[in-house]
Image (cartoon, grey):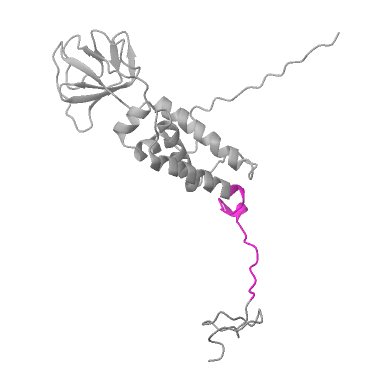
C-alpha cells in the first residue's frame, strides 16, 4: 500500500518589511487623500466625554468608545488629538494639540468626533506587496535578495508602486499613478536586462559601436563614398 506525502508551502508574511516606509508614503500623497484610500470605513465614530479633562490630560474617557479605531485622531471643539490605544472606553497615549490646534480644557459631555486618519496597517500591506513585486524582477538578476542597502531608485519605485496599490483599493486609479506604475515596471525590466546599474557589480557595458562612414563623405549630400553613390552637392 503506497503512502502519499503532502508538502506544505509556507508563505511568509512581510508586514514591517519593505523598500520604503509609511512615512515616505505620507510625504508623497496628501494626508486627506491617503487617509481616504487607506481606509475601508464609510462612517466616522462620535461620542461624548465622560468627565472634564485638563489641557495636559493623557487619556480621554468617553461614554462609549466602541466605534472608534484602536488608534487614530479625534476632534473636541477646535482641538485635534491623536491617540494610540482604545480600551474600556478610554483613549490613551494622547498627543494633544496636533495639526496646529491648541490643547485646552474640555467639559464633560463635550462631543468627541473621529477624524479620518491614515491607516498605517493598510499602507504597510501595500508596501509589502510593492516590495515583493520589485523582487520578482530583482531576483532575476541579483542573488542577494532582499537588498541590504536600498538604492534611491528602488526606494522611489517602491513608493510609486505602493501608491498604485493604495489607489487600486478604489474603483478608479488616477492616470498619473497608472503611468508612474507602468514606468516603474519598465525601469525594473531595464534593470533585469542590465541596462540600468544599481551598484558597481551591475554596471551596464554597451556593445562597441563602429562607424560605417569615412572622413571623405560630404555632409551636404545624399551621396556616400562608402556606398559608391554621389549626391547633388558632390560636384561643388
Q: Can residue 222 be seen at all in this image of the molecule?
A: yes
Q: Is residue 84 left or right of residue 185?
A: left
- Which percent across, then down, holds residue 187? 52, 48
Rendering coords of residue 123 (x, y %)? 42, 29
Residue at left 18%, top 25%?
79
Count of numbered marks: 0
Q: Which quadrant of the view contains residue 179? A: top left
Image coordinates for residue 165, horizontal then vertical, percent? 45, 33
Q: Is residue 27 above or below residue 216?
A: above
Residue 83 lies in magenta, yes or no? no
In the displayed structure, 102 sits above or below 89; it is below
Between 144 and 2, the one lying in front of the other is: 2
Magenta segment, prevailing SS (helix, strand or loop): loop
Residue found at the far bottom of this picture: 236
Q: Is residue 77 above or below residue 27?
A: above
Q: On the rendered structure, is 58 left or right of 212?
A: left
As for residue 195 lying within the magenta part, the answer is yes
Residue found at the very far right of the displayed protein: 1
The quadrant in which residue 145 appears is top right
Q: Quadrant of the N terminus?
A: top right
Residue 73: horizontal and vertical position, in percent?
28, 23
Decide if residue 17 is in sight here. no
Quick one: which residue is furthest to the front in this view? 232
Q: For this view, does 48 lie left or right of residue 71?
A: left
Compare residues 26 and 175 and report the one nearer the observer: 175
Residue at x 27% of width, y 22% of height: 94
Question: Magenta span covers which residues?
Answer: 191-212
Residue 195 figure quarter:
bottom right
Amino acid at each position: 500500500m503506497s503512502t502519499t506525502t503532502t508538502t506544505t508551502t509556507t508563505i511568509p508574511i512581510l508586514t514591517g518589511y519593505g523598500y520604503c516606509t509609511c512615512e515616505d508614503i505620507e510625504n508623497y500623497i496628501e494626508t486627506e487623500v491617503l487617509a481616504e484610500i487607506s481606509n475601508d470605513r464609510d462612517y466616522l465614530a462620535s461620542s461624548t466625554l465622560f468627565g472634564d479633562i485638563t489641557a495636559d490630560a493623557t487619556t480621554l474617557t468617553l461614554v462609549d468608545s466602541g466605534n472608534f479605531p484602536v488608534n487614530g485622531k479625534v476632534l473636541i471643539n477646535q482641538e485635534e488629538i491623536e491617540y494610540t490605544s482604545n480600551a474600556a472606553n478610554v483613549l490613551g497615549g494622547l498627543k494633544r494639540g496636533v495639526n496646529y490646534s491648541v490643547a485646552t480644557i474640555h467639559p464633560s459631555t463635550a462631543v468627541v468626533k473621529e477624524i479620518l486618519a491614515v491607516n498605517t496597517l493598510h499602507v504597510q500591506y501595500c508596501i509589502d506587496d510593492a516590495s515583493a513585486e520589485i523582487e520578482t524582477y530583482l531576483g532575476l538578476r541579483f542573488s542577494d535578495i532582499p537588498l541590504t542597502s536600498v538604492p534611491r531608485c528602488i526606494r522611489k519605485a517602491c513608493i510609486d508602486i505602493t501608491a498604485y496599490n493604495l489607489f487600486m483599493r478604489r474603483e478608479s486609479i488616477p492616470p498619473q499613478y497608472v503611468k508612474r506604475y507602468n514606468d516603474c515596471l519598465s525601469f525594473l525590466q531595464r534593470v533585469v536586462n542590465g541596462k540600468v546599474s544599481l551598484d558597481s557589480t551591475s554596471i551596464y557595458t554597451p556593445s562597441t559601436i563602429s562607424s560605417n562612414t569615412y572622413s571623405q563623405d560630404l555632409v551636404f549630400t545624399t551621396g556616400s563614398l562608402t556606398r559608391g553613390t554621389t549626391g547633388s552637392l558632390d560636384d561643388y
